[in-house]
Amino acid sequence: MEYVSRVPRPPLDGLIDDLYYLEGAPPYARLTLPPMPAALLIVNLGAPFRIRAGMDIETAEYADGCVVTMPTRAFEFGYPLRTRSVGVHFKPWGLAPFLPMPAAELCDRPVTVEQIWGRPAIAELRDRLATAGGPHEMLTLLEEELMRRLCETTGLGLVRHTSSVIAATSGAVAIGDLSVAAGVSSTHLAQRFKELIGVTPKRLARTYRFTATVFAINPAGPIDWGDLAGGAGYFDQAHFGHEFRAFTGLTPTRYVEVRRRFLREHPGHALDGWPLPAD
């Protein structure tokens, strides 16, 4: 697969981790994405893809693309034989200035880009992207579209600053201390987080801690689960295992087995970081 990405220019760089272009044959027909401290926008330029947002949710098909606020459970992506898209990996708070509704309304409910920006706008954007002269020009067009749509968002400074503190500590921060430091009540802070991110500060901290812990796992070597859990601040190994199953649907040992399978079957693949083959 071809994967091209870049960080946008200011002020978008304070909202977005990267813009990306993806084209080619996915390594598996279905991939699982565990929850992560990020939001996602995909503008689809190929055949429709499918998303299943949790085991109790029916699979839905997306032709023009999708918008996903920060998830609280694993998502399953079903890809066509070949995929082609451009997209945005937002910081947890970064999608808020581009949404016409509170982020909490979309929590674990992916929607089409049409539902967010309207059919004429997404149709026109897809046409321009499809006729662009390559990935870099496509990313420039997408960046320009985001700059044009960027708007003032009440409470963004508060949520961004507090989220950055959570991120800097990998979630190991007392949530009560955050509201005190910000000079607001814990209720006000939680409301702003749900409006702009879709989840509470506590849930965001849990996600950052889990993500940092997973990225600390080296699937190629031996793993001391007790040391890993203790170093990440979990009460004990049982607490860590419970969180792991809540976030991925897998036990830690099963996760490592699946990761090793991916790396063994697709060494150096563009998607070798976070997605897993659907188990």
Image (tube, rainbow, N blue to C red):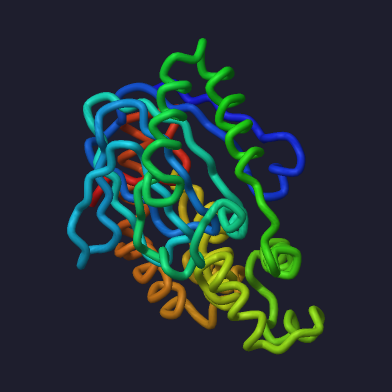
> Which residue is at the far front?
120
Q: Can residue 269 be seen in this view?
A: no
On screen, residue 152 versus residue 266, left or right, reads: right
Q: In this view, does 134 lie to the left or right of 31?
A: right
Query: Residue lying farthest top?
Result: 133
Tell me which residue sits at (61%, 69%) in the image.
Answer: 231
Q: Can you tell which quarter of the image residue 239 is in?
A: bottom left
Residue at the location (70% across, 64% down)?
A: 156
As drawn, 238 above or below 271: below
Q: In which quarter of the image is the N terminus?
A: top left
189 versus 42 height, above or below:
below
Q: In this view, does 192 lie to the left or right of 106?
A: right
Image spot of residue 137 (x, y percent): 57, 18
At horizontal 41% and vertical 22% (from top left) the residue drawn is 127
- Residue 230, above or below 7: below
Q: Which of 262 and 150 is in front in this view?
A: 150
Comparing 164 with 98, the one in front is 98
- Res 80 visible: yes
Question: At which x and y percent is residue 258?
Answer: 31, 48
How many numbered circles does the render carry? 0
Give the image location of residue 56, x and y in percent: 20, 67
Residue at far left of view: 58
Rendered residue at 53%/22% (across/down): 138
Question: In which image quadrant can residue 126 be found?
Answer: top left
Give 29 or 127, whichever is nearer the viewer. Answer: 127
> Hey, which quadrant is residue 245 in on the image?
bottom left
